[in-house]
Amino acid sequence: MPNPAVNGSPPPHPLLGSSVNGLASVNGKTRALPSATRRRPRWVMYSVFLGGLLLLGVGIVVILTLRPAAARPDVLLHTVKRESLDVTVSEKGTLESASNIDVTCRVKAGQKQGGFASTINWVIDDGTRVKKNQVIMLLDDSDLQEKKRDQQIKVLQAYALKVGADKTYLISSKDGERVVADQRNVLNVAKLDLDKFIGLTLDSSNNALAAVIGSMSALSENGGFRQQIDDITGKVRLAESNVEQNFERAAWADRMYKMKYYSAAQAQAERSKLESSQEDLRSLRTQRMLLVDYEKRKSLANFQTAVENAQRLLEQRILEEEGNREKNDIDRQTKTSIYNDESDKLKEIEDQLKECRIVAPQDGMVVYFKNESNRFNNSQQGLIEQGAQVKEGQKMLRIPNLERMQVNTKVHEAMVSRIRADERKNTNFVEQLQVGMLTTIDPFLRLMGQKEEVSKMLHDEYRQQEYHIVSYGQEATIKVDAKPGLLFKGRVKSVAHVASQADSWISDVKLYPTIVVIEGKVEELNPDMSAEVTIHIRGIQDVLTVPLQSVVGGSELGSQRKVFVKTDTGYEEKEVTLGIYNDKVIEVREGLHEGDQVVINPKVLLGDSKQKTRDGAPEAEKSGGKGKGKGKKKGGGGPQIGGGDDGAPAVDEKKGDPAKKRGGKARAPQQQG
């Protein structure tokens, strides 16, 4: 008898045997129970149904995704390819001569009202070809002619005063010399009188005494005083002889009287003669004593005083003569200086008259000078025409050498740092010439070396030798609008360090004047012709490029930008790394492959998005096309490329495309080495 059910389970089927968890064991084999096989297909059916729905949805999505997108007619595409990329800067400019000589007004304005120096009486037509020393302009000289006549009178008056001063100087000099000579003669006479009175001479008989005592003992007095001493001494000796003779005669007379041969009267007479001779002897001795003791010193003092007074008077006469000479010489120099000043003024007026007749300094073409500051206004100041007034130092004409031409253009401030001009070194050639002229032994050359006109002539003559080119500037090609079939080669000669002031009022963009010289001699080119200059900054080969207008992004992204690439499912935005660029295409260094198709008008995909395009401004602010104003965000411009491994600096997009603001082509940055 079968066992009862356990836990309410139905009893096992007698044919199936025992079962566990829906499985029955029959004859030792396990089989599924009939009730289990009936419940399982329900769950399987639910699972299959849900899985089928999921697979159906996935299939629909895959089909919709993999289906090629429909082409949009408003989207323009460009195939990425490898090509050569030439980096250039293109600018518009005007032709001018590389060797210009400016004709300036050298007539001085003086005290004239308004600072005007003269008026143009006649001027040759603009653009006329002239030869050297051909008359090209005549200035009004009527005022100078009147000044010349007045100055000639002043010169004659000053000359008369100068001649009078010269003659007075000569007369006073001769008179002073005469007075000094007379006084010098007086001094000499006084000295002679002194020497005559003293009469010191060398006595050879006293040499032995001089050897013992001294040289002064060999001197003896043989002058006038000695003569007086000798005379009085002779008289004394004669008187003494007379006294002795008279004494003997008186004694003899006394004896004769005693012998009664003489009378008393005769004897008395002889005694009287003796007394008289004795008195004469005493008188002569007194005179000799006075002469020796007093008269000698008195006469010596008089002669010495006369010599000293004559010497003082001679010095006084010399000082007076020098004073008069100096006074008359100063007066003569003053009159001469006045005459020279008046003559210089007359010569200056004559030179000014010559400056009123202006001739061509070299062969070339006459070009009226145009001041850039008056180019965009209606000011008549500086206008060159008959009857126009000109100022001192004003540039009036320019005589260009038409065989060597150059282009005067202006480069945007964003590109000026990438332009390399000629590097020149000053040779000081003209300064050395002037130093040589000033140090030569030739007085004429020294005088000429001090003239300002000679210095200017030397600078004009040796202009090419003043500088030595260390390195040449970047190469350039020039197209002249008047010669469309010709292409000229050139190089950058110079780039200004200061922006042009003439364009500052047009926009806030700074433009730097740049000179590009045409190499070699040229023909049939005239100044002021319009030309287009293309400066070759750098060229690279075999690089991936895309059009500039396909780049999306602002300067804040650096060298990273975005482009839209066409895929099988639509248009995908990809990030790219950019390099150098020119006015048409830009180098792609990373992010694209050759053959990719990029959208060159991403504005249609951006729609109303505020994301910046290549112009550096939000799309909502652009309204499409080129800007036309002075606003910083108006006008097209190149993409903002940050410094990459090529070292090229970024360009500020906020200033816009410099070429579009001036009507030229877009500029390209320089690839720095």
Image: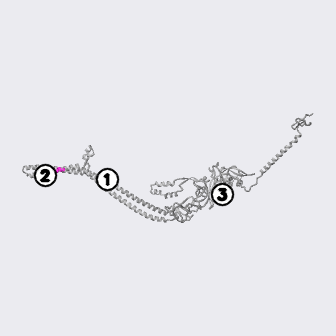
- Identified by mark 1, the residue type is Arg
What stretch of residues is rendered in magenta?
273-284
Q: Earlier in the sequence, mark 1 or mark 2?
A: 2
**Residue mark closest to the camera, 1 vs 2:** 1
Q: Which structural element holds mark 2? A: helix
- Identified by mark 3, the residue type is Gly
Q: Which structural element holds mark 3? A: loop
- Identified by mark 2, the residue type is Lys
Type of secondary structure dominating the magenta stretch:
helix
Q: Earlier in the sequence, mark 3 or mark 2?
A: 2
What residue is drawn where x is 40% and y is 62%? 161
Front residue (pair 45, 267): 45
x and y percentages locating residue 167 in the rendered image: 37, 61
**Residue 440 tag number:** none
**Residue 273 tag number:** 2
Query: With 252 as the anchor, is 578 left or right in this view?
Result: right
Q: Which structural element holds mark 1? A: helix
Give the crowd class for mark 3: few <14, some 14-19, many >=20 residues within 10 Å: some
Q: Is residue 195 visible?
A: no
Which residue is denoted by mark 1 in the rendering?
312
Which residue is denoted by mark 3 in the rendering?
627
x and y percentages locating residue 326 in the rendered image: 37, 56
Query: With 235 as the anchor, is 624 left or right in this view?
Result: right
**Residue mark closest to the camera, 3 vs 1:** 3
Q: Earlier in the sequence, mark 3 or mark 1?
A: 1
Q: Quadrant of the N terminus?
A: top right
Q: Quadrant of residue 101?
A: bottom right
